[in-house]
């Protein structure tokens, strides 16, 4: 109660900060209320989400007929894979192995559907398992703690009964972070969804304390009530959580303006098997290695974040998103590099290469809209090499005006085309940005398999890395005479370099197992293309199980050893999410 009192005491509700975020009725807009009862912003209940796919059961995204045709022109005719029913999978959930000391706790459920819904994330192998019905392993139970003390109790009992513990945020991992593995130790998944409230808001220091299980919309809705914003918008924002963002070192679409999670996470409470680690929220320190940095990216292996302190700021007065087209990739890349290196105050930059530009124009439009845009761009001299650049400003009007003036000058110097039509496209992007992930299910139902691969590298290696990554992906199924379609964008820029995000499409094979084999070949080819010491195995999705075999190429053997030793000092029995981040055998 005292914390809530302090929330109201410290917060000046009548502060002069205005809300800039549009408030139409789409449930995926930043700044809107969450889904709690009594108008209290809260997380989306897991039952309202798809058990075998992405997102809210009531949200869908159609693919245009000419968009699907374009993909099929690259990969060939496709056939849908069959999908098992929830009832069929529920029959495969075995009896829980948890001892009664655990199952008797009110916060622990051994219900089959609850266990099933916490067994898999959103990686490609997860989708194959969810549609093919072979989940392999289910957690033996799922705990829903409501406080740090609850989590301490759970870890204490986990030690007494020798359990494996898997921290679970939104379950949006795309790298196999939360999947239980076979082994003799029972598995308890700790789902953080009930710790979804703003606990304290210190407006003087601009630090908000939240339950670590708070999902994106609930974070912004609760801060929005006081005129504040975190500004972290990964594309999984609808369901992913603060704890997951910190533990997997996430990056949001407006990282240019608001920073990555590393800049936003101030400190907080991490419950480890060796005790509680309190990470101070001091703004900067030269007092030795930084515990805050050391625990970010720990992927559930060091402990469980329960309360996290986030660096927030007043909501912007004005926020705009726009689109520009440039003649080719080289011109677009130069605009990005020069904009970030000359400190133009934009909040986002995203550049699609020519193939992605063409695909987006097909996928996101009707044939008549496509024709109108193509004709408009052609009349202004842009051909098939054209690239689409999406950008945003968030701030007060004077700041935005200055940034747009500077940026427009840069755009013009590089032959850009902008106008009313591209402004509309910017708005369309902003309003639909969290709906893109729903396309995956729509394409899946057409037998079109889609996944992504992402990395980051320095500016001097961007072109070569993109080339290598795309070539590796495109040729990875040549032995089966299968074609893979691939395209790339940059969506996070830094003075020294940028992220590269490749999306690829391929055909489903005869069955789920063979389709998974195809994906494994593509994944290996893509992962090997970054194991060159110049690019990272992941810029934003983390390591999980899928990237763990490639981590040593980036960190070196000594780096892996240091990380292993650090984690072992907090978790000597290796009960916290073993096998994630660092490859190793479970002790059984
Ligand atoms: C459609 C889609 C789009 C995506 N877009 C982006 C994007 O734009 N940017 C980006 O960065 N990522 C993106 N991702 C990946 C994913 O959303 C991120 O990795 C995110 O950080 C995971 O958060 P989560 O809450 O879902 O965590 P989970 O998936 O539940 O868990 C991820 C890891 O964090 C650990 N963990 C979770 N909560 C805690 C806690 N409280 N304490 C300790 N450990 C914890 C888990 O054990 C696990 O190792 C996307 C995923 C999908 C499916």
Image: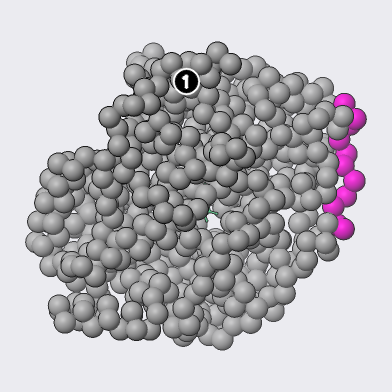
Residue 361 covered by magenta stretch: no
Instruction: Judge by depth and name the residue closer to the eye, 520 or 311.
Output: 311
* In the image: residue 346, left or right of residue 478: left
The percent coordinates of residue 259 (x first, y second) are 34, 38
Residue 329 quadrant: bottom left
Q: Which residue is drawn at 28% across and 65% down?
A: 424
Secondary structure, magenta segment, majority class: loop
Magenta highlight range: 91-101
Q: In this view, does 117 lie above or below 69?
A: above
Q: Nearer the viewer, residue 229 or 540?
A: 229
**Would you say the beta carbon of the disc 1 residue lies within 8 angstroms of ligand 1?**
no
Q: In which quarter of the image is the N terminus?
A: top right
Q: Can residue 423 be seen in this view?
A: yes
Task: Please give the name of the residue rendered at 52% of the width and 36% of the height, measured from the top-left corner.
Answer: 242
At 57% from the left and 44% from the top, the residue drawn is 35
Which residue is denoted by mark 1 in the rendering?
A: 7
């Amino acid at each position: 109660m005292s914390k809530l009192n302090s929330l109201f005491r410290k917060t000046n509700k009548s502060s002069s900060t205005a809300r800039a975020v549009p408030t139409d009725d789409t449930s995926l807009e930043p700044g809107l209320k969450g889904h709690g009862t009594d108008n209290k912003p809260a997380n989306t209940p897991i039952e309202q989400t798809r058990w075998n796919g992405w997102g809210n059961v009531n949200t869908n995204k159609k693919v245009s007929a000419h968009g699907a045709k374009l993909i099929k022109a690259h990969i060939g005719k496709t056939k849908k894979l069959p999908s098992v029913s929830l009832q069929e999978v529920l029959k495969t959930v075995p009896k829980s192995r948890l001892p009664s000391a655990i199952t008797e706790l009110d916060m622990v459920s051994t219900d089959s559907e609850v266990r099933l819904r916490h067994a898999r994330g959103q990686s490609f192998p997860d989708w194959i398992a969810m549609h093919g019905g072979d989940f392999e392993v289910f957690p033996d139970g799922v705990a829903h703690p409501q406080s740090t003390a609850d989590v301490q109790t759970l870890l204490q009992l986990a030690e007494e009964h020798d359990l494996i513990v898997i921290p679970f945020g939104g379950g949006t991992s795309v790298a196999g972070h939360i999947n239980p593995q076979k082994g003799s130790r029972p598995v308890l998944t700790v789902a953080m969804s009930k710790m979804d409230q703003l606990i304290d808001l210190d407006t003087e220091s601009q630090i908000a304390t939240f339950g670590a299980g708070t999902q994106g919309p609930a974070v912004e809705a609760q801060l929005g009530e006081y005129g504040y914003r975190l500004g972290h918008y990964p594309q999984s924002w609808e369901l992913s959580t603060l704890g997951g963002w910190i533990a997997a070192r996430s990056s949001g679409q407006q990282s240019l303006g608001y920073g990555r999670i590393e800049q936003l996470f101030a400190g907080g409470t991490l419950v480890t098997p060796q005790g509680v680690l309190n990470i101070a929220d001091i703004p900067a320190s030269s007092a030795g290695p930084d515990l805050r940095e050391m625990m970010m990216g720990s992927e559930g292996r060091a402990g469980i974040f329960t309360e996290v302190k986030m660096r927030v700021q007043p909501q912007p007065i004005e926020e705009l998103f726009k689109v520009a087209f440039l003649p080719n990739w080289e011109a677009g890349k130069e605009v990005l590099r020069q904009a970030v290196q000359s400190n133009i105050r934009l909040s986002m930059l995203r550049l699609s290469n020519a193939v992605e530009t063409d695909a987006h124009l097909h996928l996101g439009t009707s044939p008549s809209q496509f024709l109108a845009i193509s004709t408009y761009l052609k009349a202004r001299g842009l051909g098939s090499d054209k690239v689409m650049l999406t950008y945003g400003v968030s701030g007060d009007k004077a700041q935005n005006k200055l940034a747009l003036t500077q940026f427009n000058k840069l755009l013009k110097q590089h032959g850009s085309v902008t106008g009313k039509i591209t402004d509309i496209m910017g708005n369309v992007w902003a309003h639909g940005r969290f709906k893109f992930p729903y396309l995956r299910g729509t394409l899946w139902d057409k037998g079109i398999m889609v996944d992504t691969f992402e990395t980051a590298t320095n500016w001097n290696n961007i072109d070569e890395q993109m080339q290598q990554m795309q070539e590796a992906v495109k040729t990875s199924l040549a032995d089966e005479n299968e074609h893979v379609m691939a395209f790339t964008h940059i969506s996070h820029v830094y003075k020294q370099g940028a992220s590269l995000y490749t999306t690829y499409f391929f055909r489903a094979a005869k069955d789920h197992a063979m389709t998974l084999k195809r994906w494994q070949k593509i994944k290996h080819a893509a992962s090997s293309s970054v194991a060159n010491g110049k690019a990272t195995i992941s810029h934003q999705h983390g390591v999980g199980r899928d990237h763990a075999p490639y981590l040593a190429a980036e960190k070196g053997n000594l780096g892996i050893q240091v990380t292993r030793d650090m984690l072992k000092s907090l978790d000597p029995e290796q009960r916290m999410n073993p096998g994630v981040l660092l490859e190793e055998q479970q002790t059984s």
